Image: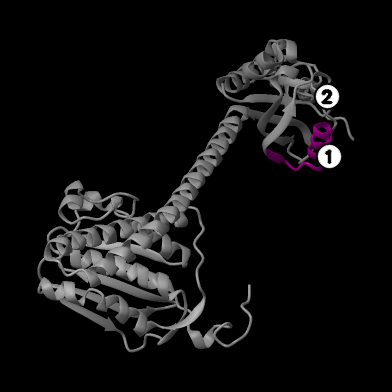
Amino acid sequence: MKELPSGAEALQVEIRRLREKIRILEGEAGAFPDLAGNRPDISQDQEKKENLLERERDILQSVMDSVKNSHLAYLDLDFNFVRVNVTYAAACGYSPEEMIGKNHFTLYPHPENEAIFAGVRDTGMPVEYHDKPFEFPDQPERGVTYWDWTLAPVKDRDGVVTGLVLSLFETTERKRTEEALRQAKETADAANRAKSEFLANMSHEIRTPMTVFMAAVEHLLQIDRNPDRRHLLDLADQSARRLRALIDDILDFSRIEARRVELDEEPFELQSCLRSAVDLFSLAAREKNLRLELEVAPETPALLVGDPDRLGQVLINLIGNAVKFTSAGEVRVCVRPRGDTVEFAVADTGIGIPEEKRHRLFQSFSQVDSSFSRRFGGTGLGLAISKGLIDLMGGEISVRSREGKGSVFTFTLPRREAGKHPRALGGEPTL
């Protein structure tokens, strides 16, 4: 590689060039006498250049030292330090002046990094790394450290590499914090899964004897006509059904959290699924003088592929809430295709939801107002379960509402028509 002049050598070249010009001018002084009186003062010119060069070096050092959170260095082509900032020097245990002339890889031997430095020097292409690990040979107690670093070539006007600029920023603390957060999240997730599995198991264990109890009460209601005892049996039946509904909600919620819900993939008649869900609330709507309407757009596919039971569960939750929280007016269930999805909307003219409380709608064990649980009942799990099921089915749910005017809950599911689905045609599903 051709040896390139340093800053001082370049200055000497410039002085020699100026002296040669002066010599030529002095040789022509006989023809041009007044030129002799305009001879430049060589010593003064050199001093000015040296002062300017020193001033530029001081400015460069000040700029480098002002960068407190990074290690900055300028190295020659043999990877010796030409200039470093205070932060870099302090980390090495030296002053900036003491660092000059020391070799980077004598201080920190590292064959892999030395090859990288040589590659930048030889190709003139910069490199950049993030969270690159490094172990200090003289500080084993620090263990593995991590660094963001950039190495860029410095080129002259002809594009020839004359040195390297190195910038280092330690990311060890950030890396350790990220790792601690990751481990904490994994621990929390494991605890949540354990909680959900416990709830699922306990709910299942409670559900079995509750089923037997409900069957016994129902049998007694059929054979015992005594008015006094029948009143008590009616209370027991109502309480058992409410408890069974609570257990079912907790079981579903815990299964969803634990990702233990298995979805069926089968062709089903959408109209039948919708009608079954709506008909469950026909009597309740009539008792409250509410209009309960089902509207299905003509272009909606008649046969879909999915889990009709889970879809029905979502519709029952949404329609049940709409009827429960509406005292006058109507509840409408609207279905229509929208692109590659099917859109379901449940609209009501009920009490509505204040804007500042909508963020709590899909949280578990949460209701918009604590007085609702006393006035309307419920566990606050219905919407959380619905959202979980919709997520599992690949859909999305949203809500629009005006307090005192009503609400519209809208969810979409992938549009998978039975006639276009492999399983519906008797073939194997594709991945």
> What are the residue bounds of the magenta stretch?
112-129
Label annotation for residue 109: 2
The residue shown at (42%, 78%) is 339
Q: Which of pointers 1 and 2 lies earlier in the amino acid sequence?
A: 2
* Image quadrant assignment for residue 55: top right
**Three-letter code for the amino acid on which mark 1 is drawn:** Asp
* Image quadrant assignment for residue 270: bottom left
- Quarter of the image for the N terminus: give it: top right
The residue shown at (68%, 18%) is 49
Q: Main secondary structure of the magenta part?
A: helix
The mark closer to the camera, 1 or 2, is 2
> Outermost residue toward the right?
1
- Quarter of the image for the C terminus: give it: bottom right
Return the residue nearer the eye: 367 or 141: 367
Name the residue tied to disc 1: 122
The residue shown at (21%, 66%) is 322
Residue 21 lies within the magenta run: no
**Residue 335: percent from the left, percent from the top?**
32, 79
**Three-letter code for the amino acid on which mark 2 is drawn:** Pro
